Amino acid sequence: MATSSSEPLSGYKISEGPVTSSSLPRPDVEELTGLPVHFGEPLLVAIARDPRTLFVCWSVDWPAAFAKGLPADRCAHVRIRQNGNEKTVAVEPMRGSCAIEELEPGETYSVELGYYAPPETWNSVVTGNEVMMPFTSDSADQMIDAATIPFHLTFQRILDAFRRSNGDDLAQTLAQFQERANRSELSRDEAEVLRALDLSPEDLQKTAATRESLAKSERLRERGEKLFGGASPGEGFGGSSW
């Protein structure tokens, strides 16, 4: 005998309204910023972009970091220290990176990321690596090894492209990679990394031109020292601008 079609099916229920989750999903950070939602320990990496500019990038689970309260000014802050001096720069937390300019060539800086809540209370989120800025002329080799890091790169894309590099050698790895790319010496896998970094031929040509200009300047400086005794007009005018 056939079973009546009017009998309800076990395990199923017809809803009179749309079926949705009762909990709201977390904001889609990856879609909005290019950074995936970060879980686990926060990360902070600083790289010298040129003798006076520090490129700082981070990956932080901000909902967890702000669990005790939102920042008073709705901003995170990058704090850098050098020889007892301190500078704090307000940043958009979800942006994932920033550039800090007007630093001193040859100086070493420590980097920290945090926020103020309450307004006068500093809450540290993560401490990054120390960075020695390249010299402008006294050590041209160090300057030439400094990579050109395009500002459009996000922290996650850099990490994905150079998984084996840590914060201390990342700039040198980028510099060597860009040099090989400019000479068309990349392997197929490295060419994929180039595309992932969104570096154009113009970017590489600009990097090569900068390095060549620095090398020429160093050769001229060495010749001048041999001819005129090596006195530096800049001696005695050091110190921090902040």
Image: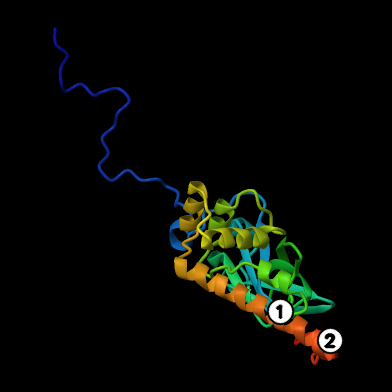
Residue 66, position in %: x, y? Answer: 62, 62
Q: In this figure, which residue is indicated by the disc labeled 1?
A: 219
For mark 2, give the secondary structure: loop
Q: Examine the rendering and report whether any part of residue 67 can be seen.
A: no
Left or right of 100: which side holds 87? right
Kindly identify the amino acid type of the residue bearing the numbered disc 1.
Answer: Arg
Q: Examine the rendering and report whether any part of residue 194 can be seen.
A: yes
Left or right of 182: which side holds 111? right
Q: In this figure, which residue is indicated by the disc labeled 2?
A: 230
96, 52: nearer the viewer = 52
Find residue 94 and report its image quarter: bottom right
Find residue 217 and report its image quarter: bottom right
For label 1, the crowd category at 10 Å Cα-Cα, with few meaning under 14, some 14 to 19 and many 20 or more, is few
For mark 1, give the secondary structure: helix
Which residue: 73% across, 77% down?
120
Residue 89, position in %: x, y? Answer: 65, 77
Which residue: 20% across, 21% down?
7
41, 52: nearer the viewer = 52
Q: How has the structure been colored for display? A: rainbow
Above or below: residue 149 compared with residue 87: above
For label 2, the crowd category at 10 Å Cα-Cα, with few meaning under 14, some 14 to 19 and many 20 or more, is few
109, 23: nearer the viewer = 109
Q: How many marks?
A: 2
Above or below: residue 231 compared with residue 161: below
Q: First in sequence, mark 1 or 2: give its number.
A: 1
Quadrant occupied by the N terminus: top left
